[in-house]
Image: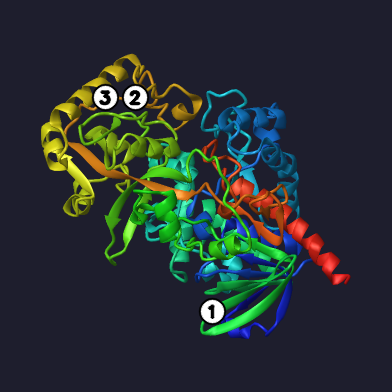
Amino acid sequence: MQVLNALKDLPAEAAYDLVVVGAGGAGMATALYAALDGKTVLLVERTEFVGGTTAWSAGTTWVPGTHHAAKVNPGDTLAEAARYLTNAIGERTPAALRQTFLDHGAAAIRQIEDRSEVKFRPYAKHPDYISDLGGSTLAGRAMEPVPFDGRLLGDLFKLVRPPIPEFTVLGGMMVDRTDINHLLALTKSWASFKHALKIIARHGLDRLSHPRGTRLVMGNALVGRLLHSLSMQAGVTLALNTSVERFERDGAGVTGVVLQGQGASRRVTARGGVVLASGGFNRHPGLRARMLPGADMAWCPAAPGHTAEAHALAQDAGAVYGEGALSNAFWAPVSLRKRADGSTAVFPHFVMDRAKPGMLTVNKKGERFVNESTSYHLFGMAMQATGSVPAYLVCDATALQKYGIGMVRPGASPKDLAPFLADGYLTQGATLDELAGKLGIDAGGLKASVEEINRCAETGVDPRFHRGETAYQQNIGDATAGTKNPNLGPLRTAPYFAVKLHPGDIGAATGFATDGDARVLDAQGQPIPGLYAVGNDMHSIMGGVYTAPGITIGPGLVFGCLAARHAGARASVAAQG
């Protein structure tokens, strides 16, 4: 792989088999699939890093029917996966497109694992999110990337987008949920002590020569593995800090791009096609105002690259957005805190706090409005649907110590809490009345909500919101808490604490309409020759329904494989004259 230090280093009138716009997970995978098939690829990235939001994510990849599934759920079938998607999504997206994903998923994963350094492993238990629907499963469809040694990248390590600082410990050490469990239990288990000692010692050595840890996990591991694999491909060129100024077109479709970067301009021919993988529309002010009204861009926890600069170019070529999605974006509740450098940390509350015993969420009236253990997507949608913006995640001292809350770690001492209290990220009250007064919410409503949760904890049943009734919800609770319901526990130990929540869009669900080869469609439903879309630039086959963990990365890889194959075939035909 060649990495361009400046666009001017790219020869004038260069030609490649594929031009991929965007070096997030889907774009990198598309480039890798094409390169593995012997095609030349120009991978264009407008920022200084590769990885996009994938690098900040858990890296979970949802692809049913792979060879990994048999290790943890040998009875699962593609027919059951299709039934689940039909039950969850219905007619919001074409069933045939979802079936294409299912039919080609296993082969796409097998190919990338057999022929590159990209490796996955299954979770022993990782339920589909709507686990009470027919066809859902508890394990086998969601995979995680195997941790990766970033030192193997050499000088390329600096190109991997660093993780969100608040998701690291000890000054840049990445941890996944396995590591977190071992770190929390290091004084209780010899196995946990050994695991914790090993990763901490490794991090200490890393910091002698690197600005952060080189043991990459989750999304950083997937991006590191993709980059390492691309680095071995002679036919790949990576252009960073480069934008697409326009598409080159002829009467038959898109034939190339004109690029701008570091004061230079280059025209590039794409013999097979141009693949849009720029991450979606979420940071485009105009599209955001139209598609996500009322959602402040400051609440978005995704990476900064998805500005939709190329979307207008695609629309000029005839592209249209898909329709029928439950929501134009996928959501999570987020909390905000100013960093010392003046930037804002946007922290998604995925699984570590809100669904645990001793936690509840209320609105300005102090009233519960949502099942706190539902998926983060449905949680964020409920905030907007009920006007509960902001909302308040509340816990007692016992829950805070055991689980933490947002950016506050479990086991925090009074000294640890002080800066969070000082800057207002965390609010503390000796009583519920005091906490409500400091938050500016109704004290009577808050006390009634706490009384309700305490009654639910006694019986293990939440009659109003049905908290903790499904396998997914119970999986993100605490089965070791000793309560009748792993998601329900009382709030009785003062002081009480709260963090303010906003609905944060974590990725686009609405993108360009495509066919089964990821070809972008026009208003008449016809493919635009030479133009493809994958990742969040492609209209999600999930139709705005968050069906399972990894339902953006999984389809991104599979349709990246299909786009690379189709565009590569076009390039071969063009080469033959």
Q: Secondary structure at mark 1?
A: strand
Residue 488's disc number: 2
Classify 10 Å Cα crowding around label 1: few (below 14), some (14-19), many (20 and above).
some
Answer few, some or many: residues within 10 Å of disc 3's Cα (few below 14, many 20 plus, some between 14 and 19). many
The vertical placement of 233 against 289, above or below, is: below
- Decide which of 55, 288 is in the foreground and name it: 288
Pinpoint residue 107: horizontal percent, then vertical percent: 76, 46
Q: CA distance from mark 1 to mark 2?
A: 54 Å
Under mark 3, the amino acid is Pro
Q: Which mark is residue 261?
A: 1
Residue mark closest to the camera, 1 vs 2 = 1
**C-beta proximity under 8 Å, tags 3 and 1:** no
Image coordinates for residue 231, horizontal then vertical, percent: 66, 69
Horizontal side, residue 450 vs residue 259: left or right: left
Task: Find residue 320 and report its horizontal and vertical position in percent.
Answer: 59, 53
Image marks 3 and 2: residues in contact by CB distance under 8 Å: no
Whether residue 194 is visible: no
* 58, 83: nearer the viewer: 83
Closer to the camera in the image, 102 or 212? 102
Tell me the residue at 71%/32% (across/down).
Answer: 78
Amino acid type of the residue that numbered disc 1 sits on in the rendered structure: Gly
On residue 490, which mark appears? Answer: 3
Say whether disc 3 or disc 1 marks the residue closer to the N-terminus: 1
